[in-house]
Image: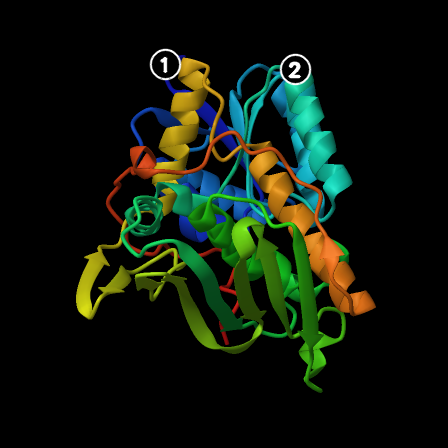
Amino acid sequence: MSRSRLRIAVIGQGHFAQAAVLPAIEQLDDVELGALVSGSRHKLDELADRYGAQVACHYDDLDGLLASGRIDAVYIAVPNDMHAEMTLVAARHGVHVLCEKPMAPTEAECMQMIHACEQRNVKLMIAYRLHFERGNLHAIEAIHTGKIGEPRAFTSVFSQQVREGNTRLSKDVGGGAIYDMGVYCINAARYLFRAEPDEVFAWNATSNDPRFREVPEMTCGLLRFPENRLASFTTSFGAADRSVFEVIGTKGVLTMDPAYEMTGDLKSTMTVNGHVTKKTFKARDQFAAEIVYFSDCVQRDMQPEPSGQEGLADVRIIRALLKSAQENRPISVPKVEISRRPDLNQDIAKQPIAPPHLVKAAAPGAE
């Protein structure tokens, strides 16, 4: 293997890894697929053959793989409850970590991950793909430069129908709409306001649908930011597809619709004093972009944005929202210090690719 290329192991071969991560790596010149890790031998055999991975191993063999010196970094794409464990294994062997969001189910696990990586001088990046997507970065820039005046209110909805049996409906693996989809709304409010909330309030709502035996069908959250700004969002696993946010300022309104999708075009509308400006941001491979950035951070010894602190900030807010919904009262949120926010300098364009054939995996909403 050429040492000039980042040798990355993808841990977990579910729908997300197969549909997005593996195809993204395949199109990159400076990154190579060093290994596949899964609990399914069938997946390993077929995917290793398709993508030319030289190593394909079970989770039980991960420690040996990372100790071998053949891997520079891992992309962690397993269920949420396994993120911390896999990160700690990688850090122990000095292997850099790109971990899917949410970072982990609890603040304690997030802090474990951060400390382990700091102790071994390992790069830890949380895979917030929209930090490299031009539509969202354009919205950040427009608001930060005062195009709609002082931002006062943020609203958002992110929803989909999730089929029975999907792991996102399991409490034990850190499932639930607020972890899986609400994290996008929370993160967007934070990067658009460029601030951290002081206090939150939330409600859960669940129908009689048997899918929601373990996790709420939907959660509505309210976040109070400094300077008397408010953000509200609703996220659901039992509603039609919706992906939108709106920021209302003292002079105008900026809307992204769709806002969070990983495929297809994203669109913005900005209205100021009756003048409407619409923009379409053509589909890109958002995962290739974030992997390129991560690779650059490793090769150039730069601290990534989004960092582990960024992931911790969202999980801390999620935990506060869950506590609020349980206790029916506002919950204060201790601040996480965020030294950097995403901006247009992180815009990276990679061409989208055709959806690949999946091996024993299905989209969350597939019939």
Disc 2: CA contacts within 10 A as few (<14), some (14-19) or many (>=20): some
Q: Disc 1 on helix, strand or loop? A: loop
Query: Can you tell which quarter of the image residue 25 is in?
Result: top left
Q: Where is residue 159 in the image (x, y as percent from the top left)?
A: 50, 70
Residue that badge 1 annotates: 4
Q: Where is residue 241 in the image (x, y as percent from the top left)?
A: 44, 74
Residue 225 horizontal side relative to residue 131, left or right: right
Towards the viewer: 96 or 126 = 126
Label 1 is placed on what type of residue? Answer: Ser
Residue 352 horizontal side relative to residue 48, left or right: left
- Residue 113 vertical placement versus 136 (above, below): above
Q: Residue shown at 55%/43% (left/top)?
A: 100
- Residue 301 vertical placement versus 218 (above, below): above
Decide: marks 2, 1 in contact (CB < 8 A)? no
Residue 315 horizontal side relative to residue 246, left or right: right
Where the N terminus falls, by quadrant? top left
Residue 353 horizontal side relative to residue 197, left or right: left
Q: Residue shown at 50%/41% (left/top)?
A: 127
Q: Residue shown at 30%/57% (left/top)?
A: 148
Question: Is any part of residue 130 visible from this angle?
Answer: yes
The dot on residue 120 is: 2
Label 2 is placed on what type of residue? Answer: Arg
Q: Position of residue 237 (x, y in %)?
A: 58, 72
Towards the viewer: 272 or 30 = 272
Q: Position of residue 229 (x, y in %)?
A: 52, 57
